Image (cartoon, rainbow, N blue to C red):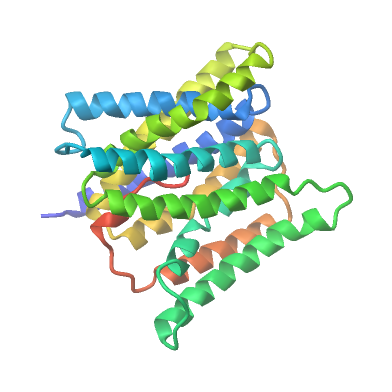
């Protein structure tokens, strides 16, 4: 029997994951000020993939494991891992040009794009709901992006990269759903993470060849935090929630990631909160909430969040 104590434990775990991911986004923002972006992403993904591999091999925390066929391995290499590699690179590079809270808010729109990808416009209530949700989310992004176009010297590269990352995450999520017919969420993360890191390794090596890195204890500590807490523990808590709660309910917690990121970035990096952030976040959350109304959860929805 699923008790209120279980619900409280899952809610507490999700709250921790939101805090972990908010601090993770802030940590990556700090790292890109000192280290090249693709190296940050690549090294972290190698570590996360290795940790999940060991956990899957030596523990039963994530349930039974499944063998991959040669065809499935080729598909993971060509499609999902490549998409993940480009997504993580876009996410990390975007933090060089815009605030961590803005990047998190752009990524928070990915459930809306996933909803639109489920089908074209039709003359029914469900289609109206989907396109209404997209309209709300887009209006929030326009409010967030508009000042960059009207400010002399405004740098909009980070915003465009973050928006592109949200589309890439939607594509990766759909590929995850196909893989979830055979693999668990943890197995998908393990299989795609290290392969995505392999895709990025040549670029990371080129970045390292440009000059020496400043290896300090604060930088190494932040990278370890982003790997362990932002990459492994947060995913484990999120995946546990997906096992017991409807996806729409879990997504409601995920809507708090931009706010969590904003608070951490303000506290740790002194990033100012823009005047448009709160209005934009309210519209994006409203769009995601509208899009999740009366959705039937599916087992294949169990994929990582956009802050992996």
Q: Is residue 132 left or right of residue 56?
A: right
Q: Nearer the viewer, residue 27 or 3?
A: 27
Q: Estimate the x, y position of residue 227 in percent, counting from the top left.
A: 44, 27
Res 282 quadrant in image: bottom right
Using the rendered image of the protein, determine whether residue 307 is visible from the camera's viewpoint. no
Farthest residue in the left direction?
1
Q: Residue shown at 52%/68% (left/top)?
A: 287
Res 97 quadrant in image: top right
Please determine whether, in this image, residue 268 is positioned above or below residue 210: below
Q: Estimate the x, y position of residue 164 in percent, counting from the top left.
A: 59, 51
Image quarter (top left, top right, bottom left or bottom right) of the C terminus: top left
Q: How many marks?
A: 0
Please determine whether, in this image, residue 92 is positioned above or below residue 211: below
Farthest residue in the right direction?
152
Q: Estimate the x, y position of residue 263 in percent, counting from the top left.
A: 59, 42
Q: Estimate the x, y position of residue 232 in percent, counting from the top left.
A: 36, 32
């Amino acid at each position: 029997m699923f008790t209120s104590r279980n619900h409280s434990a899952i809610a507490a775990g999700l709250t921790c994951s939101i805090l972990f991911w908010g601090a993770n986004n802030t940590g990556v923002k700090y790292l890109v000020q000192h280290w090249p972006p693709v190296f940050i992403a690549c090294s972290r993904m190698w570590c996360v993939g290795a940790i999940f591999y060991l956990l899957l091999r030596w523990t039963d925390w994530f349930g039974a494991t499944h063998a991959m066929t040669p065809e499935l391995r080729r598909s993971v290499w060509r499609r999902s891992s490549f998409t993940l590699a480009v997504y993580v690179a876009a996410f990390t590079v975007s933090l060089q040009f815009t605030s961590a809270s803005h990047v998190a808010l752009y990524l928070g729109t990915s459930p809306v794009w996933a909803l639109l990808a489920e089908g074209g416009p039709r003359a029914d209530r469900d289609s109206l709901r989907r396109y209404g949700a997209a309209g709300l989310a887009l209006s929030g992004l326009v409010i967030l992006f508009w000042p960059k176009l009207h400010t002399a010297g405004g740098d909009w590269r980070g915003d465009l990269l973050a928006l592109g990352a949200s589309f890439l995450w939607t594509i990766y999520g759909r590929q995850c759903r196909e893989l979830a017919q055979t693999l668990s969420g943890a197995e998908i993360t393990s299989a795609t993470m290290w392969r995505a890191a392999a895709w990025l390794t040549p670029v990371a090596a080129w970045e390292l060849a440009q000059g020496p890195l400043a290896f300090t204890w604060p930088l190494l500590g932040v990278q370890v935090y982003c790997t362990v807490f932002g990459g492994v523990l947060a995913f484990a808590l999120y995946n546990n929630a997906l096992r017991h709660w409807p996806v729409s309910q879990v997504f409601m917690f995920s809507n708090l990631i931009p706010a969590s990121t904003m608070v951490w970035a303000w506290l740790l990096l002194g990033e100012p909160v823009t005047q448009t952030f709160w209005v934009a976040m309210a519209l994006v959350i409203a769009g995601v909430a509208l899009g999740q109304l009366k959705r039937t959860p599916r087992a294949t929805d169990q994929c990582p969040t956009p802050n992996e």
